[in-house]
């Protein structure tokens, strides 16, 4: 298929794909190859333009003119990134993470793929999650070709539901195999309709997700953020808990997990999911968290939390966006 060019201002493709929210895209030359649902794509960024080639799909009715919209929707090119960043708390650590992650966007992932992948992610590092995703795709997904590259779709819930637990364990899932298979059976049978859950409130969506095998609060928040576009959802993993305790709440040693969630909800606000992703990527990749410079912001965080407020933006912070 011919090359399609799509405007993508204020977007960093490589950083977005390497930020720990999606795990199957592979580097290929100056770009990346992967799938968006069942659609194989090769995506390359040239300044503010995405250059995209699509592979063949098994849906012949798909019209070529719809494909640019698939890319724009998947990479959330419509998110008002400057406005989102301007809503973050104005503290030293958040500012550093925001500057480091400039152009990183929250992807809109297919719901089952996102849910299944994060069930597999429990207690795993990013490199291991990528290995599991690749193994599941190669064994149970459908082969697609795009130019000289071969990619695999993520297997549908019905396919995982039919697999033996031993087969799933061979994809390096370990104890997660049982949970993934059980959840796939419930989703594949129609007992749980992931698309219908889009209508639910945040609280009800989180409750439903947590009823699925292998899904706790952290995974539920990841799925809410990356698949349901609930941008307030704030997943707290090992990295983020360390950031919160060391840099925002150093004097509150005995805060429970629930108290950390309540603090995050209040302090980071309506786009907390974006703030979390920036803090996570900055901590994981830059590994240069501000220590002394963020001490004042940490004191401010505790002070504002006790008063039920969030720090306001300075005019200089807004202007930088």
Image: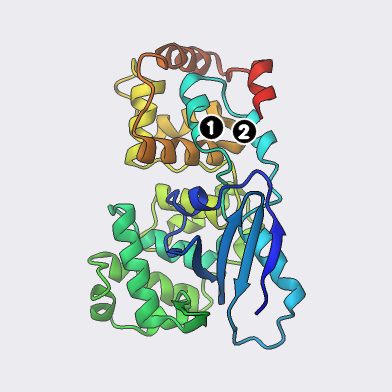
Q: Position of residue 79 (x, y in %)?
A: 68, 46
**Rendered-image quadrant of the N terminus:** bottom right
* N-terminal label among 1 and 2: 2
Q: Nearer the viewer, residue 189 or 288?
A: 288
Distance between the alpha carbons at the discs numbered 1 and 2: 7 Å
Residue 289 is drawn in which quadrant? top left
SS at circle 1:
helix
| Label disc, if present, on residue 98 of the rendered structure | 1
The residue indicated by pointer 2 is: 85
Q: Who's the residue at 36% across and 14% down the image?
A: 292
Q: Are marks 1 and 2 in contact (CB under 8 Å)?
A: yes
Residue 151 shows in the view: yes
Q: Position of residue 237 (x, y in %)?
A: 36, 42
Q: Who's the residue at 55% across and 53% down the image?
A: 13
Q: Nearer the viewer, residue 62 or 156?
A: 62
Could you classify mark 1 by the number of other residues whose Cα lies within 10 Å: few (under 14), some (14-19), or many (20 or more)?
many
Q: Position of residue 148 (x, y in %)?
A: 47, 80
């Amino acid at each position: 298929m011919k090359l399609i060019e799509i405007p993508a201002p204020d977007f960093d493709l490589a950083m977005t794909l390497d930020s720990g929210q999606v795990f199957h895209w592979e580097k290929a030359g100056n770009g990346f190859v992967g799938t968006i649902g069942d659609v194989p794509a090769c995506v390359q960024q040239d300044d503010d333009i995405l250059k995209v080639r699509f592979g063949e799909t098994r849906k012949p009715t798909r019209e070529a003119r719809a494909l640019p919209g698939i890319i724009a929707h998947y990479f959330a090119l419509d998110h008002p990134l400057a406005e989102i960043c301007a809503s973050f708390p104005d503290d030293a650590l958040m500012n550093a993470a925001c500057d480091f992650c400039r152009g990183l966007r929250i992807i809109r992932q297919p719901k089952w793929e996102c849910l299944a992948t994060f069930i597999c992610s429990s207690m795993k590092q990013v490199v291991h999650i990528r290995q599991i995703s690749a193994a599941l795709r190669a064994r149970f997904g459908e082969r697609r070709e795009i130019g000289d590259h071969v990619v695999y779709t993520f297997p549908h819930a019905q396919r995982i539901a039919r697999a033996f637990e031993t087969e799933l364990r061979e994809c390096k899932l370990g104890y997660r195999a049982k949970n993934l298979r059980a959840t796939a059976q419930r989703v594949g049978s129609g007992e749980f309709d992931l698309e219908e859950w889009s209508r639910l409130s945040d609280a009800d969506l989180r409750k439903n997700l947590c009823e699925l095998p292998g899904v706790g609060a952290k995974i539920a928040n990841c799925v809410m953020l990356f698949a349901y576009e609930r941008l307030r959802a704030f997943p707290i993993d090992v990295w983020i808990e360390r950031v919160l305790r060391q840099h925002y709440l150093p004097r509150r040693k005995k805060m429970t997990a629930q108290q950390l969630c309540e603090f995050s909800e209040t302090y980071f606000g309506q786009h907390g999911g974006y703030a979390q992703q920036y803090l996570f990527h900055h901590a994981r990749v830059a590994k240069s968290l501000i220590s002394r410079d963020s001490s004042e912001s940490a004191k401010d965080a505790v002070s504002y939390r006790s008063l039920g407020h969030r720090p306001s933006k300075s005019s200089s912070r807004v202007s930088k966006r």
